[in-house]
Amino acid sequence: MRSFSFVAVALSSALLSSGASLYSKRSTAYLQQNGAAAKALNDKYATLTASSSCNDGDIACISGQFAHCWDGSYYLYSCPGDWTCAAIPNEWSNGTTTTCDSPDDIAYRFSVAGVSETKRSTSDRPNRSTAYLQQNGPAAKALNDKYATLTASSSCNDGDVACISGEFASCWDGSYHLYSCPGDWTCAAIPNEWSTGTTTTCDSPDDISWRFSTAGISETK
């Protein structure tokens, strides 16, 4: 097992050209429908360790880190900032996604789904706010514009994260190493909706489009 920083990529050109009219409806019904399956995955992940057996391509969450299996071993990626890894119920479509997410968003999703998942009281959460999206949008766009200038051979310092050709890019040993997002998700610098700032992480194309549309930021090229 080797541990790396969880990494990020810029929005793909297809995503950048998507408009607000193209994303599906954000629905609490999806959260309620998908909550039980997400909890079952998290219960399974809680039994795993970095030395657990795995098949190439498997993904999981191990001790709060994103885990990906290749060559028969799990490789762990630390989530950005105070985020943690979890299987979360999708709120744009059927199903679940295993990824890094903020504790506030994870607690919100499972609370709305009617599933007891976190030890944190939902009454302790800050408000989910479009004002935060509007405040944080320009900084997130600036990061994505920066990521779009990079290539796999760009110079980097160990620990840097970036966006290269639609894949995660994490720097170690002085070089970028690329890793794809799970499922149909992509990675981007996104404006936080729970607090000041941005987070570079995997997210669904629908949620990314919604965040930038709500922030009043055009992400099209």
Image (spheres, rainbow, N blue to C red):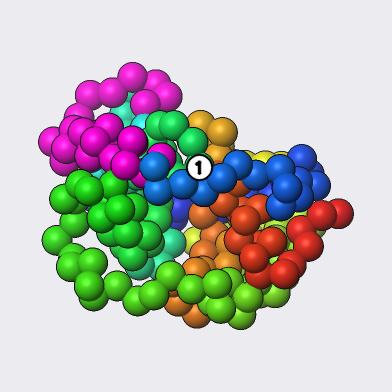
Q: Secondary structure at mark 1?
A: loop
Q: Which residues are magenta?
A: 30-58
Q: Nearer the viewer, residue 167 or 208?
A: 208
Q: As drawn, which residue projects farthest toward the top? A: 55
Tell me the quarter of the image containing the C terminus. bottom right
Query: How far across and how far down the image is residue 110, in percent?
Result: 27, 51
User: Would you place residue 72 above or below residue 123 in this image?
Assistant: above
Is residue 205 visible to us here? no
Q: Residue at x 65, y 44 (%)?
A: 23
Q: As drawn, which residue projects farthest toward the front? A: 29
Q: Residue at x 57, y 51 (%)?
A: 207
Query: How far across and how far down the image is residue 202, in percent?
Result: 52, 48
User: Would you place residue 188 above or below residue 30 in this image?
Assistant: below
Tell me the quarter of the image containing the N terminus. top left
Is residue 18 visible to us here? yes
Q: Nearer the viewer, residue 164 or 195?
A: 195
Q: Residue at x 40, y 32 (%)?
A: 95
Q: Residue at x 58, y 67 (%)?
A: 191
Q: Nearer the viewer, residue 166 or 30?
A: 30
Query: How far across and how far down the image is residue 67, in percent?
Result: 34, 39
User: Would you place residue 78 above or below residue 72 in this image?
Assistant: below
Query: Is residue 150 shown left or right of residue 28?
Result: right
Query: How far across and how far down the image is residue 122, in percent?
Result: 23, 67
Query: Is residue 16 shown left or right of residue 208?
Result: right
Tell me if mark 1 has few (under 14), some (14-19) or many (20+) residues whose alpha carbon lies within 10 angstroms of its own. Answer: some
Q: Nearer the viewer, residue 80 or 116?
A: 116
Q: Label 1 sits on what residue type?
A: Trp
Residue 2 belongs to the span the image colors magenta: no
How many numbered callouts? 1
Quarter of the image where one finds residue 214: bottom right
Residue for badge 1:
92
Residue 36 belongs to the span the image colors magenta: yes
